[in-house]
Image: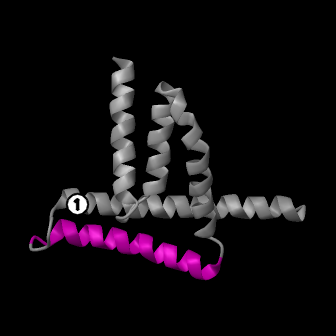
Amino acid sequence: MKRILLTVAGVLILAIGIVLLVLPGPGLLLVLAGLLILASEFPKLERYVDPVRDRAMKAAEDSVSSPLRITGSVLAGLALIAAGVVWGLVPGLPLAGWSTGTSLILSGIVLLVLLGYSYRRVRARRGLASGT
């Protein structure tokens, strides 16, 4: 039963991550999370985890590589949150409602949290490299 539940959860998270690769949201991180869950039950999938993890970390570091990128990422996160509120409140929009609005708001919050994490991680790495 545990194996079935983990497989279903892993496939679901992986599928959502793949969809979010082209839609607003933390797609690559969800792909990684899905792969990690599936690799715990299917060891042959472990060979895909490190490349996806490396790519996700590289994308996170790139998002904070310059003040312009940080500003753009913050604005994108705030725009997702604002769009979520609009989608939740305005009934005439396509797919209007709080289900769409909530997913946009959560995507914006996740983006801002990941941006903060990436910034701290890159700053800590630079501090270690400079010896401070």
Q: Nearer the viewer, residue 17 or 119?
A: 17
In the rendered view, tell whether residue 14 sits above or below residue 28: above
Q: Residue furthest top?
A: 1
Query: Residue 87 in the image: x percent, y percent?
Result: 21, 69
Q: Residue drawn 35% across and 68% down? A: 81
Q: Residue drawn 56% across and 42% down? A: 49
Mark 1 secondary-structure assignment: helix
Q: Nearer the viewer, residue 24 or 98?
A: 24
In the rendered view, tell whether residue 112 sits above or below residue 65: above
Point out the image quarter for the C terminus: bottom right
Query: Residue 110 in the image: x percent, y percent?
Result: 44, 58
Point out the image quarter for the N terminus: top left
Magenta span has 64?
no
In the rendered view, tell whether residue 43 sits above or below residue 120: above
First to last magenta residue range: 66-91
Q: Amino acid at mark 1?
A: Thr
How many numbered marks, from 0 up? 1
Query: Residue 47 in the image: x percent, y percent?
Result: 58, 38
Relative side of 97 to 36, left or right: left
Magenta span has 81?
yes
Q: Residue furthest left?
A: 92
Q: Residue drawn 39% across and 45% down? A: 14
Mark 1 surroundings: few (<14), some (14-19) or many (≥20) residues within 10 A: some
Magenta stretch, main secondary structure class: helix
Query: Residue 124 in the image: x percent, y percent?
Result: 75, 59
Q: Which residue is mark 1?
A: 100
Q: Quadrant of residue 21?
A: bottom left
